[in-house]
Image (cartoon, rainbow, N blue to C red):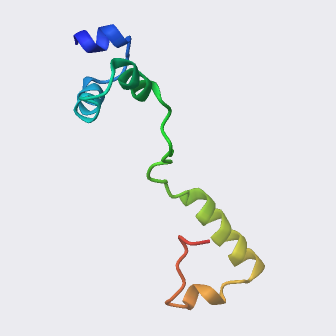
Amino acid sequence: MLVKLKAGYKGPLLTIKRLIHTCLNEPFSFFVRKLYRKPQRSSKGRRKIDHEAIYQATVRQVMVGETEHLNDLSYDPLIL
């Protein structure tokens, strides 16, 4: 907690613990720079399936008459 207060960090203590382990032999200023650096990659996380869009696409295909592919066993409606 003292390191968190000294650095003025608002994030979780687990992040500080991991960085302390990594930067144990480095100066405090280096530790603070690493603590406040931006993440290099951004994860969009697990993507949700838009069931409504899949349904609308299927309805449109039925109305137009493009339903031959629906009998194909290799067709995957989740991959549009």
- Residue 7 location in percent, x, y? 36, 13
Where residue 57 sits in the image (x, y, percent)? 67, 68
In the displayed structure, 46 sits above or below 34; it is below
Towards the viewer: 50 or 12: 12
**Quadrant into which the N terminus falls:** top left
| Image-based side of 34 in relation to 42, left or right | left
Residue ranking furthest to the right: 64
Q: Is residue 24 above or below residue 28?
A: below
Please say if 49 is above or below 57: above
Q: For residue 26, what is the image quadrant? A: top left
User: Which is nearer the eye, 66 or 79?
Assistant: 79
Q: How many labels were placed on the picture? A: 0
Q: Quadrant of the C terminus?
A: bottom right
**23 and 52: which is toward the camera:** 23
Q: Nearer the viewer, residue 75 or 56?
A: 75
Task: Give the residue displayed 54% in from the left and 59% down from the top.
Answer: 51
Residue at image x 77%, y 78%? 64
Q: Residue at x 62, y 60 (%)?
A: 53
Residue 4 coordinates in the image, percent (x, y): 30, 14
- Please say if 75 is above or below 5: below
Who's the residue at 35% across and 24% down the image? 31
Measured as percent of width and height from the top left, residue 18 is found at 25, 33
